[in-house]
Amino acid sequence: MKVIGSALLACALMIVCGCGVSEPGKVEGKMMKTVKHKLTVGGKDVPNPIPASAENIADGQEHFGHHCGICHGLDGQGTGVPFAAKMSPPVPDLSSKDVQDYADGQLKWVIEKGIDPSGMPAWKEILSDEEMWKVVDFIRHLPTKGSLGIPDVYKEEQEQHKHMDGDKHHK
Ligand code: HEC
């Protein structure tokens, strides 16, 4: 009985571990998310003092374009950012439910402090409180994916590639 019992247990463990091996990223990612949302991301009860007026959203969009677009795309949805999906952890789509589920105060907290360890920088000394709140307003009112085009840096790169391709065709 005991032997069968442990054999069963071993089987069960193998099944459990087997699952873990095939999808470690998913399980880990989910756990990390839960930990981040529940424990580490503060600011949940801090209200956004900057109303989401058209003007403030436009200001937020401008700051976002300058500071965040290089990784998140001008639209916050990764448009034109070649490495967004390849980063570890990947750069998230800010229109996704995971991000939108944050309270305004948590988004501000993430922007202010960044996420360590990951590629998301902290903006404490770079943006003022007011600017960060405006960026939060923008994140709440993201434009249609792709509607703002791609960040200039990548545009130039694309054009260079085009020129290079063009050169190839001339030869
Ligand atoms: C150098 C690239 C880079 C820049 C610049 C950058 N981010 Fe991020 N951002 C990331 C990465 C990578 C993540 C994913 C971090 C993670 O999941 O651990 C992220 C995650 C986020 C999240 C989601 C956080 C979460 O817990 O899901 C928000 C919101 C965000 N960034 C906003 C911004 C804003 C606003 C700016 C500009 C002020 C900005 N980011 C600039 C790389 C960047």
Image: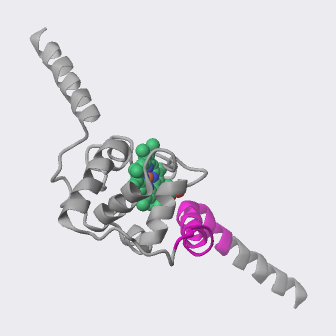
Rendered residue at 37%/44% (across/down): 67
161 magenta-colored: no
Q: Horizontal and vertical percent for residue 22?
A: 56, 62
Residue drawn where x is 63% and y is 72% of the image: 39
Q: Considering only vertical position in the picture, is 74 above or below 105?
A: above
Considering every residue shown, the one lying at the far bottom of the view is 1
| Quadrant where the image shows the N terminus | bottom right
Q: Which residues are magenta?
A: 15-43
Q: Locate residue 120, reporting x and y percent.
A: 49, 50
Residue at the (43%, 52%) spot, across then down: 128
User: Would you say the magenta stretch is mainly helix, strand or loop?
Assistant: helix
Residue 59 in which image quadrant: bottom left
Residue 140 on image: x %, y %: 30, 68
In the image, taking residue 73 as reference, residue 162 lies left or right, namely left
Q: Position of residue 25 (x, y in %)?
A: 55, 60
Report whether residue 59 is seen.
yes
- Residue farthest left in this picture: 170
Q: Closest to the observer: 106 or 101?
A: 106
Q: Quadrant of residue 48?
A: bottom left
Q: Is residue 32 magenta?
A: yes
Q: Nearer the viewer, residue 93 or 69?
A: 69
Asked if 146 appears above or below 103 in the picture, the reply is above
Q: Where, quadrant-wise, is the C terminus in this rendering?
A: top left
Question: Which residue is most to the right?
Answer: 2
Instruction: Name the residue: 31% across, 49% down.
Output: 63
The image shows residue 149, relative to residue 136, as above or below, that is above
**Horizontal placement of 93 versus 157: left or right?**
right
Residue sitting at the far top: 171
Q: Nearer the viewer, residue 171 or 99?
A: 99
